[in-house]
């Protein structure tokens, strides 16, 4: 794995247990969401790691039951010509949370820490400037009141290859595999070196990296959600159950005939 740790294989989680535990954790995420709104917290969670490491699936499970007005997912495309001429962190700053929001970054400013230097998308000077500037940038965010949490998803080369092959066989997931992914697949060691160097500079006390063993996707999802909940103290401020009032009786309004409307064909 990326973190050089070899664990004995664990038994596969039973589907019933996984779904029950995921539901329990998602209920707690709703409580956290309401607390973030009430207290006006600003939360940033960064998800990084190799391609097919399980970042997207975990983000999906976190956001699945939450209000998109409170919990936003940010997954940026490659920078435009205008953005290339900006201060590097500028396009990410515009997506930072306001009070009462949590933002999940599906890849982040750390593109310059790993992907860009390996793929040759930035100069050597830009790369080293990023490593020098990033810790100060994050300290500034934290001083401003942002809760910053960083996860690195660690996947083995064998498991990554298995997932890539699955994607290539599945027409609904093949879009996830790009020409860049194909090239990155051949640069495993280069990515390892870049990740280790990036950790040397950015795994700091104020904003540490939390490494997620993600060869088992289901365990990784549960572990991350549980850990995320443990990092932000919250109280249950979810509104009490609401009872629907009785509808008043109609006053004789006659609606237009249904034949005047255009319906979706009922094929199924």
Image (cartoon, grey):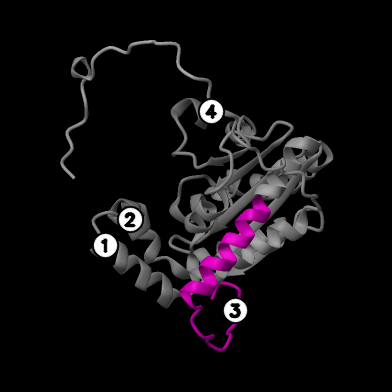
Q: With respect to residue 98, does 258 lie above or below?
A: above
Q: Mark 4 against mark 2, which lies toward the viewer?
A: 2
Which type of secondary structure does the marked residue at label 1 adopt?
Answer: helix
Spot occupied by residue 48 in the image (x, y as percentages of width and height): 56, 56
Query: What is the CA distance from the residue labelled 4 to the residue labelled 1?
Result: 36 Å
Q: Mark 3 against mark 2, which lies toward the viewer?
A: 2
Query: What is the CA distance from the residue labelled 3 to the residue labelled 2?
Result: 26 Å
Q: Few, some or many C-alpha atoms within 10 Å of disc 4 (few <14, some 14-19, many ≥20)?
A: few
Quadrant including the C terminus: top left
- Say if residue 233 shows up in the picture: yes
Which type of secondary structure does the marked residue at label 3 adopt?
Answer: loop
Which type of secondary structure does the marked residue at label 2 adopt?
Answer: loop
Residue linked to disc 2: 177
Q: Few, some or many C-alpha atoms within 10 Å of disc 2 (few <14, some 14-19, many ≥20)?
A: some
Query: What is the CA distance from the residue labelled 1 to the residue labelled 3?
Result: 28 Å
Q: With respect to residue 216, does 240 lie above or below?
A: above
Q: Few, some or many C-alpha atoms within 10 Å of disc 1 (few <14, some 14-19, many ≥20)?
A: some
Sequence-first disc among 4 and 1 = 4
Q: Residue furthest bottom?
A: 8
Stretch in magenta: 1-29
Circles 1 and 2, Cβ within 8 Å, touching? The answer is: yes
Sequence-first disc among 1 and 3 = 3
Sequence-first disc among 3 and 2 = 3
Q: Nearer the viewer, residue 92 or 54?
A: 54
Residue linked to disc 1: 168
Residue linked to disc 3: 4
> Does the segment drawn in magenta span residue 41?
no
């Amino acid at each position: 794995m990326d973190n050089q740790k070899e664990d004995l294989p664990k038994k596969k989680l039973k589907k019933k247990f996984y779904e029950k535990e995921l539901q329990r954790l998602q209920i707690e995420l709703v409580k956290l969401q309401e607390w973030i709104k009430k207290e006006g917290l600003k939360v940033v969670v960064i998800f990084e790691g190799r391609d097919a490491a399980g970042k997207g699936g975990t983000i999906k499970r976190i956001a699945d039951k939450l209000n998109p007005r409170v919990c936003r997912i940010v997954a940026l495309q490659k920078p435009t010509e205008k953005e290339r001429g900006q201060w590097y962190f500028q396009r990410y700053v515009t997506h930072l949370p306001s009070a009462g929001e949590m933002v999940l970054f599906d890849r982040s400013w750390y593109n310059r820490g790993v992907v860009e230097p390996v793929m040759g998308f930035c100069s050597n000077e830009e790369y080293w400037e990023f490593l020098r500037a990033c810790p100060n940038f994050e300290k500034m965010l934290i001083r401003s009141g942002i809760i910053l949490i960083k996860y690195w998803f660690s996947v083995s080369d064998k498991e990554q290859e298995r997932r890539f092959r699955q994607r290539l066989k599945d027409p609904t997931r093949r879009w996830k595999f790009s020409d860049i992914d194909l090239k990155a697949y051949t640069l495993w060691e280069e990515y390892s070196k870049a990740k280790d160097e990036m950790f040397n500079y950015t795994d700091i006390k104020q904003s540490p990296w939390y490494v997620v063993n993600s060869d088992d996707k289901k365990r990784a999802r549960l572990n991350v959600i549980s850990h995320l909940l443990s990092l932000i103290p919250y109280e249950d401020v979810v509104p009490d159950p609401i009872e629907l009032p009785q509808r008043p009786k109609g006053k004789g309004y006659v609606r237009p005939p249904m034949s005047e409307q255009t319906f979706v064909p009922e094929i199924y």
